[in-house]
Image: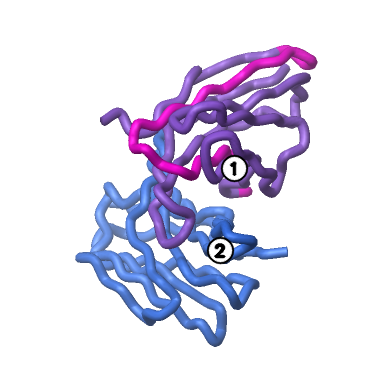
Chain colours: A purple, B blue
Amino acid sequence: NAGVTQTPKFRVLKTGQSMTLLCAQDMNHEYMYWYRQDPGMGLRLIHYSVGEGTTAKGEVPDGYNVSRLKKQNFLLGLESAAPSQTSVYFCASTETSAYNEQFFGPGTRLTVL
Amino acid sequence: GENVEQHPSTLSVQEGDSAVIKCTYSDSASNYFPWYKQELGKRPQLIIDIRSNVGEKKDQRIAVTLNKTAKHFSLHITETQPEDSAVYFCAASTPSGGYNKLIFGAGTRLAVHP
């Protein structure tokens, strides 16, 4: 099993450009999450999904959109990138949301110039 | 809203010493407290967790204690080794509308010097 994978690993965007980050998991997990990690601020939840076809806002959803068309995939979109969105983005998945380990992907380092 | 505070932000110890990282949480309904370790450039990985009905849990050199009354929980690493050097995150999980929300602390950078 590959676990949780993310594409791409690195990306540089100019302000105003758009992009989509792809997260895939092969563990048949219901729950999937997108976090951003900034120095000194830990992991902050952007959006999450409790199952195929569902999405919900986390702590810092502004400027991002998500879709979960297939159970194994969770896409994070930036419609108009801003320098404040420069960060490392992690995707994670769990079998359920209670008492379960979150399995993280390897991360995507995004720089917005 | 829910908040998890983590201290210290950096910790430097000599190999063989013990290290303690402390977290406090704000929501008394929190019922699950995992700890994640993140090595440089890598993904966070779960190292130990504790549920609210347990006061202490140990796994070899790592232990976690929970004080529900004070809303504190701590990570204890004994006999530290250079490979323990990493950033450690505590987190608190709280039931919220059919979903368990996980809030992370800001992290502690642990450096173990040979």
x%, y% of residue B88? 44, 54
Whether callout 1 and callout 2 share a subunit is answered no
Q: Report the magenta residues as a range.
A: A14-41
Question: Vertically, is A88 above or below B20?
Answer: above
Residue under circle 2?
A: B6
Q: Secondary structure at mark 1?
A: strand
Residue under circle 1?
A: A48
Sort mark 2 into few (<14), some (14-19) or many (20+) by Cα contacts within 10 Å.
Answer: many
- Given residues B61 and B13, the one toward you in this image is B61
x%, y% of residue A12? 62, 14
Q: Residue at x 44, y 49 (%)?
A: B87
Q: Residue at x 54, y 87 (%)?
A: B69
Residue A18 position by quadrant: top right
Q: Residue at x 54, y 45 (%)?
A: A50
Q: Are marks 1 and 2 in contact (CB under 8 Å)?
A: no
Question: The disc numbered 1 marks a residue on which chain?
Answer: A
Quarter of the N terminus of chain B within the rendering: bottom right
| Left or right: where B58 falls relative to A92 | left
Q: Is residue A39 magenta?
A: yes
Question: The disc numbered 2 marks a residue on which chain?
Answer: B
Residue furthest left in the image: B60
- Given residues A35 and A11, the one toward you in this image is A35
x%, y% of residue A10? 52, 18
Residue furthest bottom in the image: B69
Residue B17 appears anywhere in the view: no
Q: Tell me the kind of residue under disc 2.
A: Gln
